[in-house]
Image: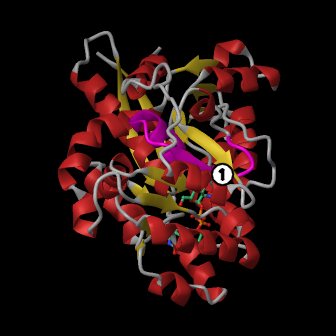
Amino acid sequence: MNNILKVIIVAGARPNFMKVAPLIQAIKKHNKELKSSNVKINYLLVHTGQHYDIGMSEVFFQELDLPRPDINLEVGSASHAVQTANIMIQFEKVCLDEKPDWVLVVGDVNSTMTCTLVAAKLGIRVGHVEAGLRSFDRTMPEEINRLVTDVLADLLFTPSEDADENLLREGISLDKIKRVGNIMIDTLISNLDKARENKSHEKIGVKAKHYAYVTLHRPNNVDNRLSLSRILECLCRLSRALPVVFPVHPRTRERLEIYQLWDKAHTTSGLMLTDPLGYHDSIGLVDKAKFVLTDSGGLQEETTFLNIPCLTLRPNTERPITISQGTNKLTSLDTLEQDLNNLLNGYRPNGRIPELWDGKTGERIVQHLVQ
Ligand code: UD1
């Protein structure tokens, strides 16, 4: 007779879907190879509905072969307080009905922090995947989400040594910290062939290694007219020398429209705006880009793994390993033009793939859970 461990896995926003996919794969594999003395894991996938557009959510379920969520809280967009409150009210009911042994949360979005808070108050154990990352910048909502999640979680699954050090400095006990590697890279490794077969750059009409790939959606960059228009000017100038492929996040699109910058962006030849892309298209385009400009967390890691030069338009990063070991560099509005020119002129950083970015992170997490 097996023991049963009941686990709720939470996903809410776009970057979460790539992180829960390997967990579910690893649980399925564990259950399939079960020996009679082992613990079987019964999981439920809860989607908070923080992201709800087809292009921000559904497409990832299809591409990553994710099961339909067992429960969708359908909270949608709102202010941080309203969104947090709505998730709390609904997720508490789910926990009371389902009585899980563990709640597993991933990343640093509002859904991550909120479900952790609910579970911790009900005395349900929480595992946080991608724990310990710190930008030390509390103007970022994600930093607040990371701090709250990590102080409450019972198991902290970290991607790298710097994350362990951050947690220890904050007084988290060593026995809670499990360095398991980078979960995003599990998904990247298992989908890379498919992404390459897609040849998305050919469909868009750009030549391999002869375009820049750009994604920008952080409030600090896009929720301010002056910075968004300066970024756009830079991109327009860049696009005269090199085609720029820029899938536009809904927040960024809304801001471009409000600030009346959309028409300029849309009519600049060489600046190729698209709707948000699915996972395979996005990875395929990163893989064949000359370089990437982004403010996303995930892209800093994906470019490091794929050895593609990356400029991150932020004053800091919670992923310093992508700079110390990978191909990432921070830039600002004042240095952007120069940094882009250096890359245009052929500058390439030396990078290597960090330890434990090996595609086996999901399996290591499952081993810790059943122990
Ligand atoms: C959220 C995460 C961020 C992550 C990003 C990836 C938080 C605090 N932020 O930011 O860490 O990098 O997701 O996308 O959790 N919208 C849609 N359709 C959707 C989702 C959003 O149109 O499916 C629009 C809405 O106008 C919404 C805005 O985008 O108000 C912002 O969405 P929100 O989830 O609040 O934050 P993101 O900027 O996406």
Residue 112 pos. (x, y %): 60, 47
Residue highlighted by disc 1 = 114
Q: Position of residue 72 (x, y in %)?
A: 44, 61
Residue occupying the point 47% across, 45% down: 346
Residue 123 included in the magenta stretch of the image: no
38 with respect to 233 (left or right): left
Instruction: Report the front residue among 104 and 147.
Output: 147
Q: What span is colored magenta in the figure?
A: 298-317
Question: What residue do we see at 27% from left, 53% from top?
Answer: 63
Are there few (<14), some (14-19), or many (20+) residues within 10 Å of tag 1?
many
Residue 197 x, y percent position in the rendering? 18, 49
Location of residue 169 (image quadrant): top right
Q: Is residue 316 on the magenta stretch?
A: yes
Identify the image quadrant of residue 276: bottom left
- Please determine whether, in this image, residue 213 is positioned above or below residue 10: below
Which image quarter has ligand 1? Answer: bottom right
